Amino acid sequence: MSVVVLGGSVNVLRQTIEPIEALTDAGVSTEASSVKCTLQSTPRLPEFSMDGDFVIGGVFSIHYKLHTVIYNYTAKPEPLRCTGSMNVRNLQYCRTMMFAIEEINNSTELLPGIKLGYRIYDSCSSVPGAVDVAFQLSNGKDPVFYKGSNCSQSGVVMAVVGDSGSSQSIGLSSIIGSFNISQVSHFATCACLSDKQQYPTFFRTVPSDQFQVDALAKLVKHFGWTWIGAVYSDSDYGNYGMASFLNAAKREGICVEYSESFYRTDPLSKIQRVADVIRRSTAIAVFAFLSNGDMKVLLEELVREPTPPRQWIGSEAWITDPLLMGFSFCSGAIGVGIQPSIIPGLRNFLLDLSPSEVAASSLLTEFWEDAFNCTLTESAYLDKRVCDGTEDINTLKSPYTETSQLRVTNMVYKAVYAIAHAIHNAVCQETNVNNQCDKHFRLESKQVFSELKKVNFSCNGYPVSFDANGDPVAFYELVNWQKTESGVIELVTVGYYDASLPKGQEFRINRNITWVDDSTQVPVSVCSESCPPGTRKVLQKGKPICCYDCIPCPEGEISNTTDSPDCFPCPSEFWPNAKGDACFPKPVEFLSFEEVLAIILAAFSISGACLAIVTAVIFFRHKTTPIVKANNSELSFLLLFSLTLCFLCSLTFIGAPSEWSCMLRHTAFGITFVLCISCVLAKTVMVLMAFKATLPGSNAMKWFGPPQQRMTVVSFTCIQILICTVWLVVSPPFPMKNLTTYKEKIILECALGSAAGFWAVLGYIGLLAVFCFVLAVLARKLPDNFNEAKLITFSMLIFCAVWITFIPAYVSSPGKFTVAVEIFAILASSFGLILCIFVPKCFIILFQPEKNTKKFLMNKN
């Protein structure tokens, strides 16, 4: 019960239901109808039309602009009309629809005996134009008709093919969807049209932009472009597409330096501003989600001034447009395109334009005159020649005649066949002999809508079906603009994207790609260069995540991947290499026998032991001489034996620590030194007792004879043995890996186990040494010609000085030098004893035998 009133850019629904009396006054018989449906504006005629049993509508953006007029509402508005240049690709789409319907009408398998008609309109690439066409297609084409109360059903189309743009398709679907008229678009890719709540009757043969932006985001990520610019059409196609792309890019870790939108009808100043942003940007890669018309306007602006080389990444809307390939500075552009196909017979149909057929259509006339720069009407253009009939469309180089790579054209072809199959399934019945179709079947558009959901067939070898959202299976070719030897840019397929494949396998590249400036190297488009292994990324303040600085990993940490956000520490026994990108086992350090320091210390140790043995041999050979017998030769030999052990025990500190060597080195050192000091202490006491024995009435020597001397040595030594035994039982020394002193290496050392045990051993040695030193000091001025107490005093002074300085040196020395200090202390104190006590005696024995007499020794002067 509605009549559409069309006028200007705003379409008004209006119904006039007049009383019977008014109809009588107007001269209309009341018997004819109780309701008169009147179209309140001049109907707009289709660009191409043909009657048929069932009519299919077609909407294409043939012209780029809509002629706008400001109305004063004093007269009926005129039908909308288009202006601007013609998009001849869309003219090819119109003619392809006509070809497909003619092919179906001649078919004996699809809709046999039924003739399809068409009504094809130009939406002028605008939403108002598309809405205007929607009303035209939803109503009859007669100015006045009498159909009872069902006025709007006169000449309603069964379904509509189109439109080319997403914004136009949204406006179109919003109107015809209310009447359950299905729409099958060949090029409206906006993901928003998959929403069946808003656009329930919308279908398309071209994949949704959601698949396209996923493919393009993976493409950008694949080539390492993490810093890109973005321009997009200020339309539903561009706005929805760019929003989806930005989300996909964020998931892939891609940063967008700028995101600029415009529309081809915008003021020139805005388009210039967008071009300047592209020129000034640091991003080499530019993602352009533009319609072909918008891209053409942008490239025309960029070509005015020199533009730095840019790697263009294109959407399917413009990347396959041959008209844009004339911009040579875009060589190397890469993007996704609809799969090409071959439609047998189409080229002949497109080129079969007779002069009468051209003259009968204003669109074909405009195309002909623009293509050949002539006029079919002599008085129409004074600056053009009159077409003389020599024009040959077969030689014309135009997107209209280009059929070598039919991409979107095939989407139109499949859309027509999808509608035809839906109608066939609704009005035809299969028999054993053939298909029987009823052309008088009262088919409604909602039945075609129901059948469209279920269509599943092959067209020229390509499957045609729709999912629950009205979308086909997404399949794209990866195309590249490559310059030939002659300097002409041609479109080359270098890979594909198939959304039906498992995740991670959708994207394939199978051919070499040419990049910007005809380079064979992938251009670099990053905000910051990749951080090599051994460094980590630190974001630059106030900038996107793709802009960062590369900071070397701190000491002890590595990063072994490119662009690592963090460094991580090596395991405790590993250390980074110089580059900081790998962990290697730490070098193990201990005082090895192969080292020069160890060899020197071992040499001194053996030399000291040899010196003690040589001294013992000298004493043994001269054991009957007074100087040897003077101070108990038994103690002297025991002292030389202990000194030999002291020299040799230092060897246990060299080499890799083991469980036994750790226990042996400390206990052997403690026991042998106590034995040594005990002997010295016994000798010191004996000197004191001997001097006391010379005093009148003194019997001191009987209290410190040889048995007491032996007992003294054994007693003091047993105490140290007891301390060492308790230490070894409670908490013995053990080998350990020192990981704390040096971070970059491991020190093998002997842990003390019980620190109290270690310091008890040292403390006991020190106590005996101090006691011995005090006694020696007391006896140093006894009036003997050869006072051994003086020699003991010097030896114990050296001994105490060495071990006093040993303690801070031992604590502060790192690593293997701790062991070296301990060995040095052992050797220094041992040499101090043997040199101070025995060397003077050996010198007299060997070189001054005249002093080796009892008389000389007893002389107190």
Image (cartoon, rainbow, N blue to C red):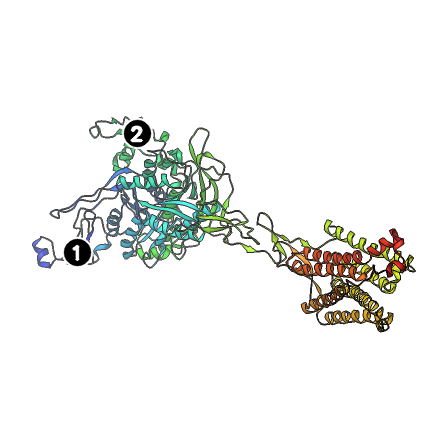
Q: Mark 2 or mark 1, which is nearer to you?
A: 2
User: Which of the pair 73/290 is nearer the observer?
Assistant: 290
Q: Position of residue 738 (x, y in %)?
A: 65, 59
Q: Amino acid at mark 2?
A: Phe
Residue ID at (27%, 40%)? 269
Q: Nearer the viewer, residue 793 or 355?
A: 793
User: Which comes before the other along the chain, label 2 or label 1?
Assistant: 1
Secondary structure found at label 2 = helix
Q: Which residue is labeled 2 in the image?
A: 372
The answer to whether 555 appears left or right of 378 in the picture is right
Q: Position of residue 10 (x, y in %)?
A: 20, 50
Residue 657 visible in this rendered orientation of the protein: no
In this image, 221 relative to 807: left or right? left
Q: Residues within 10 Å of mark 2 (few under 14, many from 20)?
A: some
List the residue tagged with mark 1.
15
The image quarter in which residue 782 lies: bottom right
Q: Quadrant of residue 383?
A: top left
Q: Is residue 55 above or below residue 707?
A: above
Q: Which residue occupies 82% across, 67% down?
A: 691
Under mark 1, the amino acid is: Gln
Front position in the image: 831 or 686 = 686
Q: Secondary structure at mark 1?
A: loop
Instruction: Locate the C terminus by quadrant.
Output: bottom right
Name the residue rendered at 73%, 53% in the picture.
592
Whether residue 3 is visible, yes or no, is: yes
